[in-house]
Image (cartoon, rainbow, N blue to C red):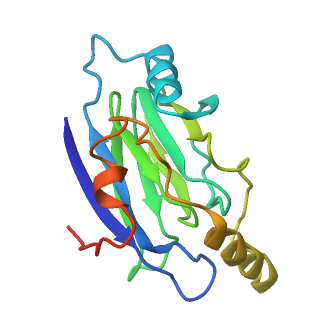
Amino acid sequence: MKIDTFFVRDDGNFFPNNNQLPVIVYRQVFDSRSVSASNWEQLFKRNNFGQSWRDGIFTFHHYHSTAHEALGCYAGHAQVRLGGDDEQVRKDVELNAGDCILIPTGVAHKNIGQDSAFAVVGAYDLDGRSYDMNYGKDAEERRKAEDNMKKVEVPRMDPVVGESGGLIQYWKKNTPHQET
């Protein structure tokens, strides 16, 4: 498994994104023979991520201000845009079957292209609150989202590797983060 991290900065307009916690992409958590929706669900549950669902990723920007989201791809592939459409902020990531992306609270994301087989399991930190939906529609939504984001804690377990590595390494409090 390979882990990539990067920050998605505040766009100064519609999406707060997250200047404190990097997005984490886990490559080939499962190989093509072992990847399945049920394997993602079991892994997430074992690592304290739940409220899981199976589906795709919306084709419009949205974000969660009350929860961090893990998306485990179990079929096909897709291009996911993070951060909005501002060319100075956005990051595009390809997800393939077996990959997982951990999206910190506040980071806008949408599907910008997929094959016909693409599907993910989504899950949220069980120590946190239920997830909400925000769309970058106005200043009032953003103000409420920013207030919510201040209350969301770093999960005690990483959705993929559990109690060591992943978010434990990259999101640990008081640890300076660098873009990679």
Image position of 166 (left or right of 8): left
Which residue of the protein is positioned furthest toward the right in this rendering?
A: 140
Q: Quadrant of the C terminus?
A: bottom left
Q: Residue 11, position in %: x, y?
A: 51, 83
Name the one closer to the observer, 43 or 80: 43
Q: Quadrant of the N terminus?
A: top left
State which quadrant residue 2 falls in: top left
Which residue of the protein is positioned furthest toward the bottom in this rendering?
A: 12
Name the one closer to the observer, 149 or 2: 149
Q: Residue at x 61, y 86 (%)?
A: 13
Q: Residue 95, position in %: x, y?
A: 36, 41
Q: Residue at x 52, y 22 (%)?
A: 41
Which residue of the protein is positioned furthest toward the top in this rendering?
A: 33
Q: Residue at x 27, y 45 (%)?
A: 165
- Whether 79 is drawn above or below 91: the answer is above
- Tally of marks: 0
Name the one closer to the observer, 127 or 130: 127
Image position of 87 (left or right of 69): left
State which quadrant residue 142 falls in: bottom right
Q: Residue at x 49, y 69 (%)?
A: 83
Image position of 142 (left or right of 82): right
Q: Residue 137, position in %: x, y?
A: 75, 75
- Whether 63 is drawn above or below 162: the answer is below
Q: Residue 112, position in %: x, y?
A: 48, 53
Image position of 75 (left or right of 175): right
